[in-house]
Amino acid sequence: MLGYVIAEGRGAADRVLAEVARQLHDEGWPLAGAVQVNSERGEMHPCDMDLHVLAADRIVRISQNLGALAKGCRLDPSGLEQAVGIVEAALDATPRPRLLIVNKFGKQEIDGRGFRPVIGRALASGVPVLTAVNAANLPGFEAFAHEFAEPIPLDFSAILGWCRNAST
């Protein structure tokens, strides 16, 4: 099963997915994946983007500082790939994860990189996947997921309910 929320507003999906991960962890669920944590740096600087890798309880920086006037993508591909490698290893852990949470299905995933291979591997082995997609990337996500993806409202209770149903 592949569930997704539409990211509405800056950081909204990140916060809800992190809350869901925290709740499931507190309930004893073995989890794989990563949730994004943004750290504000003030008005003149874009935020720092970090991934909290769930199974390893590790933080990996995925943004790079391009300077205050930079307009390009700040994603650090090597940071993302480092996080992906840690998450992929968690799929082989014992006990097996009950759920893979991926902070975002973004441009890297649309292009076949980032977490896309890990998502495919998890689904092929029966591990449900939860992710967020922004509206601009929805067509690329739908091309990847076809009719197998299930939209979930961006609501803590609805997402938690989906996770529990998908994991049974």
Image (tube, rainbow, N blue to C red):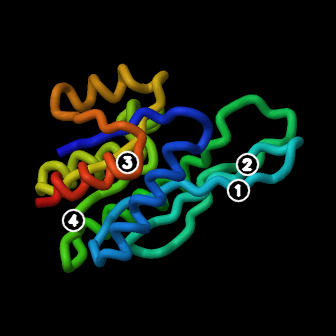
Residue depicted at x 59% and y 44%: 11
Which residue corresponds to the image point at 27% horizontal and 23% vertical from the top-left?
143
Residue 78 drawn at (x, y percent): 55, 53
| Residue receiving disc 4 | 98
Q: Dot 2 surroundings within 10 Å: few (below 14), some, or many (20 or more)?
A: some
The residue located at (70%, 56%) in the rendering is 39
Contact (CB < 8 A) between labels 2 and 1? yes
Q: Amino acid at mark 1?
A: Ser
Q: Nearer the viewer, residue 15 or 130?
A: 15
Position above or below: 4 against 123: above
In the structure shown, which secondary structural element does the residue marked by tag 2 occupy?
loop
Q: Residue 135 or 105: which is nearer the viewer?
A: 135
Residue type highlighted by circle 2: Cys
How far separated are the C-alphas under marks 2 and 1?
A: 5 Å
Is 8 situated left or right of 34 in this image? right
Circle 3 SS class: loop
Residue that label 2 marks: 47
In which quadrant of the rendered view does residue 112 lie?
top left
Ranked by sequence position, the earlier of labels 2 and 1 is 1
- Residues at marks 4 and 1, CA–CA distance in whole angstroms: 29 Å
Q: Quadrant of the N terminus?
A: top left
Under mark 3, the amino acid is Phe
Q: Secondary structure at mark 4?
A: loop
Q: CA distance from mark 4 to mark 2?
A: 31 Å
* Tally of marks: 4
Q: Residues within 10 Å of mark 4 (few under 14, many from 20)?
A: many
Say which mark, if any, is on residue 39.
1
Marks 3 and 4, the one that precedes in the sequence = 4
How many neighbours does mark 1 have within 10 angstroms: few (below 14), some (14-19), or many (20 or more)?
few
Write down the residue under mark 3.
115
The residue lying at 63 percent from left, 52 percent from top is 49
Residue located farthest toward the front when viewing the structure as drawn? 157
